[in-house]
Structures are given as C-alpha cells and as structure tokens.
Image (spheres, coloured by chain):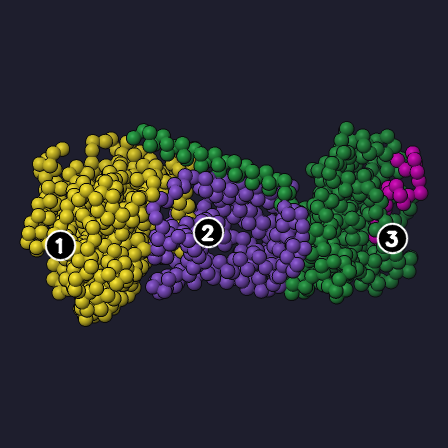
Amino acid sequence: MDLLTFARGPGLQWAVTIFVIGVLWKLVGVILLRAKPDLSEPRNPSTWKGLRLIITRSWPRKEFLRSTAFTEVLGYTFHIGFLVALLFYLPHILFFEDVFKGVLGVNFQQVFGVQWPYFSGGVINFFGAVTVAALIAVLIHRIVSPVKRLISNFDDYFSWFVTIAPVVTGMLAYGHVGAPYQTLIAVHLLSMELLLVWFPFGKLMHAFTVFLSRGTEGMQFERKGASL
Amino acid sequence: MSAADVNQEHPLELESPRVSVKKPAARYDKQGDVPDAERVKRAMQNFVKDFGRTAAIYMESCIHCGMCADACHFYVTTENPKYTPIWKLEPFKQAYKREYGPFAWLYRTLNLKGKITVERLEEWQELIYDSCTVCGRCSLMCPMGIDIASLVSLARHGMAKSGLVPHELWAVAERAEKEGSPLGATPKVFKDRIEWLADDHEVEIPVDKEKADVMCTMSSIEIMKYPDSIVATARIMNHLGVDWTFRLDGYEATNFGLLSGNAEWQKDMSLKLINAAIACGAKTLVLPECGHAYGALRWSGANMYGKPLPFRVMHIAEFLAENTKSGKLKLKKLGKSVTFHDPCQIARRGGAIEAPRDVLAALGVELREMEPGKGLNWCCGGGGGVVTIHRADPIRYKVFQLKMNQIEETGAELPVTSCANCRQTFDDGQAHFKWDKKMNSLLEMVADNLEGKAA
Amino acid sequence: MPDSMKPRDAGDAHEATLGERLAARGVSRRAFLKFASALASMMALPPSMGLVMAQAMAQAKRPSVLWFPFQECTGCTESITRSHTPTIEGMIFDMISLDYHETLMAAAGHQSEAAREQAMKDNAGKYLLLVDGSVATGLDGAYSTIGGQTNLSWLTEAAKGAAAIIAVGTCASFGGIPKANPNPTGARAVSDVIKDKPIVNIPGCPPIPVVLTGVLAHFLTFGSLPELDALGRPKAFFGDTIHDRCYRRPFYDQGLFAKTFDDEGARNGWCLYELGCKGPVTYNACATVKWNAGTSFPIQSGHGCLGCSEPDFWDKGSFYKALPVGQWGSAATLGGAAAVGVAVGAAAAYAARRRQDKIAKGD
C-alpha cells in the first residue's frame, strides 16, 4: 500500500474513529460527573441568560483590552485563517459534504438549499499564509513571554505543531513544492490525521469545552448577579 | 484544646493596624505529623474529592494563553510569571488529570503525569495562599470562561487536608473552630463588648432575643478592631424600628474554614449562623461588612445546610440599600466626593455591586468611580486570608500600591468600602506607606448620618 | 550492443540495419531525424541527442523481442499496433525483431512455441522480454496457462535469459484489474515475481504507445534503460501528474468546476475535479502526448481521468467520486465509534465518582 492509499483509506478511518471516540469519551466523561444542585437563592432567577457569556467572552472587557490586544489579535488571525482554509476550500468541502451525506443520508445542498460556498485556491493559499505567519508569531510569543513560557508544556507545543502542519503541508501540496504531488497530498492528509488523533488528548479540545466552560461560568455568575 | 492553650500557641496581635496572630518566631507551615507521601496523597485526593462537573469543565478548558496574568494584581505589580493565576494550580491540574479526569485511567496506566512531591506542594503554598486573594479578576479575564478563583478554593481543600496551610492562617482557623472566633472574639468577649458599647454609646443592643425578624452578625475584625460597627448596626436597626437581635450562638460571620480550605470547619461555622437564625425565627440574616462572609453564607450557606435556607441572607449594604430605596431610611446629605472600593467577594463575585452605590446616592455624595471599577475593581490585596499571613506582607504592600494609586487618581475626598477585612488591609497599608487617606466604613457613615426619627 | 546480438535470420548474409530497412520502406532520413528529435525532446534529453539517437538507431541492428501475453485483454497490443497507423511510431516494429507475439504472429500452436523456444535459446541473455497482463500466482499459476504451461513458469523461465523486462500496461506493471479485489487468481505484477532483472513499467490501461517507442529507442541508442521513478516508470513520461499539465488546470486554480456532466461548467470546459477526475494523483503523459496521434485525451473530451495508470486504480473507489471523497468510513463505523466513546466516557465518570466516594469514606 502506498502512502497516499494509506493516508486516504485506513489512516483516515482510524484517525476519524479515534477522534470520535476520544472527543465523546472526554465530553461525556466530564458531563456525567457529579453536579450538585446549587441550593442558594438566586439573585437573578433566569440563570440561562448567563449563557450569553459564550458569545460575549469572545472579546475582552474594555478594561482588559490593552493588556490582551496582542494575544487576541494573533489568536483571532490564526483561528479565522485556519477555519477559512478548512471550511472554504473546495476539496475540503467535498470531503465534508461526503461525510455529511454518509452520516445523514442526504446531500448538503438538499438540506440547506444552497451550495457550500468556497474560495479559489489562490485565496485559500493567502489565508493559509496568514495563518502560518500568525502561528509562527504565536510560537515566538510563547517562547519569549516569561508567563507563557513558564506555563507551557508538551501539549502547547505539540498542539501548535499539529495545527500548523496541515496548513503548511496543504500549501506545499497546492503549490506542488518539494515532492511529487501524491507524496505532498499524502503528507497533508497524514498531518490532518495527526491533528484528529491528538485532538481529544490535548488542549485542542477547547474547541468543544469553550462552550461548556463559558456557559458554566456564565450561568453560575448570572445566578449570583456577579460580574461577567 | 482549651482557650488558654490556644492563646499560648497562637497569641494574637490586636493592637497593630492589621489583626492576626503574632508574627511567629518559628514558622510551622506544615500541620500534623504525617509522612510526606501521605501528605501528597491527601492533597491530591482531597483536591478532587469536592470536584464536580463544573470544576472538571474548567480544568479541561485551559489553553495556556497566559492572559490571566494581566488580571492578577500579584503578577501585574511584580511581573513574576509564577503569579500567573492558572500556574498557581499547576500541581493540582496534574492531580486532576491523574486522579479524576476522563483520561485518569490512561494517565495512571501510562504514568504520564509526574507524581507531585511534598516539596513542590510546599513551594506552591505561597502561590495558593500568600499570593492569591481569590479575588476572581482572572476569572473575568479568562477567554475560556474558567472560574480560576473557584479552583484555587478547591486547591486549598487539598492543602488543608494535607496540613499545608500557612502558619497564621491555620492558627486563626483553628482558633475560630475551637473558640468561635479567629481573633479571640469569643461569645463572652462579644457579650462584654456589647454591654460596654451599649453603656458607652447609650444605644440599645439586643442579644439573644428568642424571636426576632432580623438576626444581625458581626465579623471578629469589627468586634476586636472596629467596635463602632456594632454600634452603627444597632443604631440603624433601632432607627428603622426593626425587630432584631444578635445571638451568642451565632454572631461571628467570618469563615476561616473557607479561607484555609478546611471544608468541615467551613460547614461548622456556617451551620452555627444558620441554626441560630432558625432558632430565633429570623426572616432575614444580615451579614456584616465582611467580604468572604458574604460568599460563605449567601452563596454557600444553603449548600452547607443541605437545603434552601428558610430566611433571606443579606449583606448589610444590601439591607441599607433596600431601606433607602423604599424610603424608610432617610439620610443626611454628606456633600463630599467619595470613591467606593468594591470588596471582591461582595461585588465582583457576590453580585452586590449596585447596593452600596444606592446607599451612597442616598448619602448625597459625589461618587467618583475607580478605573477599573465595580466588577473589575482591583482587590486591596488582603482578601482570601492573605492579610493574616506575615510572610506575605512584602508582596501585599506591593499590590496595595496599585490600590492607592487607583484611589488617588479619583481625587475623591473619602475612600469608602463595606468590608472590614479590606478596611484593615487599608489601615495597614496606610500605616506602612504613611498614606494620608483613611478607609471609611459605609455602615458607619450611614449610622453617622441618620436623619430624623424613623417609624 | 545490438552489434553483438546474434541476427535473427541466420540465413541472411548481411542483416539490414534499421536505417536501411526504413529507407527501403520509403522513410527519408530527414523524416527519421525528425522522429528521433521529437522522441528525444519528449524524453527530456538535450536537443543534440536527437541526432545521436537517429544515428545510433539507424545503425542499430534489431534486438530480439519476445512479447508474452498473460492475464490481459489485448488492449495494450491494440493500443500499440493500431493507434498510430500510419504514423512513424508504427515503425517500432521495424526497430525490433518481434520473435514471439501470439496475436500478431502467423504461426500457431506447436510452431509458435517452437519459435519462442528457439528465440530464447538463440538470444540468451540479450533479448528483451515484453509482458502484458498480470501473472496469476494462485494454485501455482494454474489460473492462466498457454499450451499447458503456466504464465508463471513462462515468466520465470524467460526472465532468466532476458536483458531486461518491459511491463506493458497496468496489469503487467501493477497487477491491474485482475489483481483488483478479490483477486481470485492471485494476480501479481511482473515486478512482484521477478526480482533480479531490470524492469520498466509502462502502466496505463492502455499505455501510451510512444512511451514504449521511447523506451525501445533509448535501449537501442544507449544500450540501457531510461531513468525510472520509484515505481519503475520512465521519469520522462511519468514525471508529472495529469493535473499538473492539464489544460483545464487554470479553472481549478480559479475555483471553476463542472458540477454535473451537462451543466454550464461542463459546457464551458471547467475543471472536472468534483466529477471525480483523478488527474491530481495520476502520473502519466496523457495531457501532453495525448491520444490518437495527438488528437485528444479523456479530460479534453469531457470526462475525468480514471487514474488507470496508477497502482490499484480499480480499488480506489468510484471513478465519479471526487478525490477527497469516499474513504472516511461509514455512518455505521462512526456510530460505533460514538457509542464506544460515550460508553467509555460514562465508565470514566462512574469510576471518578467511585473514587470520590472512596476518598470521602477514607477520611
């Protein structure tokens, strides 16, 4: 079996399987933990309103704006860049639509009535380049900033690696740089599979847990009328 | 241990601007005679013992962005990265992963998270106690919405169970558990004080009424250091014509069980108040000007009791605000400029942000807000038990400078707060820096400006 | 080398060179030079090599070539013999002495087998062995026999005396359709069976004729095989993907795709990626050499590349599924994984709760 056949076939299947098992393992494992009811008399009866924190904590309060601007801007840049390249590149979309159809049994277009929009390769390449630049800046900041350096561990660096690797390999494959296309696309797929496999075990899980933690803090604080 | 023993072992220092036990000649920051391995095991296990879904969600969500550092007064004033809030939980994060998280089995089987040593925990004692006031600013900074402060409280559970509480904090907590007050304000002392104050100030102070609508409480800091607050409380209650009382079986609102991390003691202390209020059939329990007392009873009391409390729990400022807003409590106009220092546990974490401002409005003062103010106001540096720890004085003074600057910048004539612990931290800082601003009590300010005769 | 090769027709006093044979058939020297130059450029050789090749080939004596058909469909032979008539590549058969080719030879039965054995004997160590079709290896090769002998035994026998082996077509190169799942005959590529001879793979279903011409010309000119890639394919022809050289590539880069075979995009000649074109992962020269004397190739006629020259192309999913599609598993496997994840997560939470209870009791 050549590398591409492995990467497109068994490699992908195993990666997706591990991803699904791991993510649910972690989420269910956390959600089913004890949750004692809070018996105190709420200040604000509709604690659900606290869920707004899921949205509002996406940007810092104005008091924190200055000290966090650098991290926020870089964070936004690479998150947006990564997501655009992931979600609006046609070969990726074809994959997602295929999974969509495989799981739900209907076409994406049939359900949503529109075609999944996409950008041309050149535009995606630009977003990829921006993402790589921002991620490199993020890494440098992590190494240079005393706070970030101190609190960083293997997870931080490895998660960084598995995030930048698919972007870099994707761009190389797009540009046919450095190796035969089949090898490049295989390495691109394998890097994405590495990301999927690592996902449940490291901080990439924040893509899911961010909703839980913001929602939890929001509801608990809203209950007390505490500052949010 | 008898009261005499307690006094010998943890002699108090009541004459200084900040009341605590006397600076120990030799520090004993480890309690009990426990082998190191057992200590570590207890710390790790008891950290997760009181864990639930909420804490686990928080533990899983950190992305190590480091932004919380900029919310923390200890980091901002020192720029020492070890004061990064989430770093204060580092050993406990590993405990969570090994002992409790969904992948705990994997971590243990593969031995992935290094075992924690007792030396590491001793090192972390300073981060968990001396340099965290549990003020919760970091919880508002965290882009993931992690309530870091709540995790520090859980970490203290582990530290307390393993006997790794700083000397003074342990000492006052033990005094509180043994004789009912961390600072020697035993029922007898309290009773004597009340009698003396009632005589001296010609004010009626009911004690141990069998039935009363309102049960008032005090903090030991007020009883020992700011007795005027007792008088002020009585004046206001009497002025309003409230059916109220103090109870000797439940008057002390501070909870050093909570601050030290001793969950059992925390429960004991809360239940005393709850049972006393139930005994006199109180409809309202009024908490004194004390920050953590509010968090302990208002938000944790029912959970300690095991069912909803059959009475309202109010901070004195909330009680005052309710009465000024209803028009029952009329106050003389003060006509001065004032800035209000929000006690973290009452405002930011407690939710009573507007109540003191309503009272100030009734006092007719010009309120000059600090920047940042209200829910993001800087902590005075003395909360969470930090003010009791002599070892923490140098760093506490550092963070207090932030506070002084903030207050200076408002240009207000009077700084006011509604927490006796903040107040003593200010008094101590004022003495240390020979500052010309004295912190005032909102409660006493109200008592001094009562207008007319209420019904 | 061809000089040292024993002439096929021992009766001839003078064995004609390729040049003489071409001249006899009315092909001018100029025309032949043009052909050689074209071949050289196609094989990415320096322009001066065209002349060298022409001279060398003109002087060359014809090597003996045996063409063995195994599990095949004769499509490869069709492609090579038919497609270029009357182009000059057709003269490939003038360059060589084709001593055995079942389909083309006049002889049959015992006569043909005798010719094969004779050629192997006469040219031992020097003949070229061409194979089309895969080798059945199941049941010791019994799935495919000629004259009672298995293909497998023919191949191992003939390989011993061969100077080199050229696997013509995807089946001989990689196993092809016979090797596709479930492969009942145990079909294998030539290179799976023979390990000790130089082998050139010219995959394609069918292969492009000029590739065979080029390899033979190289062999005649330099006495050696051309440079090969990791899969044994001549780099000169298999160095780029179809996608790299496709005239529709600009549409891919602009994100202009045909969504169905009869939509606006299809009529406008946009990229067929979404319709399952395997061009991006297929190495071959179709997009440059094209077919039918350079007339067209599948993509130009509006159909995506099947990837027929790639290993296991038959087992790589539907021809009409876009490349990123169809290999991630199924709803069932994902559902199974989800069930496992939920179960393990619940077990972990239960274990954590028990742990807390134990800690609480231990106090």
Q: Position of residue B79 (x, y in %)?
A: 27, 57
Q: Position of residue B412 (x, y in %)?
A: 20, 69
The residue shown at (87%, 43%) is C101
The amino acid type of the residue labelled 1 equals Val
Q: Is residue B224 visible?
A: yes
Give the amino acid at mark 2: Phe
The chain letter corresponding to green is C
Q: Which residues are magenta?
A: C91-113
Q: Badge 3 sits on which subunit?
A: C
Question: Which chain is drawn using purple?
Answer: A
- Mark 3 vs mark 1, CA separation in Å: 115 Å
Identify the element where label 3 is drawn: helix
Marks 2 and 1 in Cβ contact (< 8 Å): no
Chain ID, mark 1: B
Whether labels 3 and 1 share one chain:
no
Write down which chain is painted yellow.
B
Residue picked out by circle 2: A211
Q: Which residue is mark 3?
A: C82
Tag 1, which secondary structure?
helix
Find the residue positioned furthest to the front.
B455
Is residue A46 located in the magenta-colored stretch of the structure?
no
Q: Read off the residue under disc 1.
A: B231
Q: Amino acid at mark 3?
A: Arg
- Mark 3 or 2: in front is 2
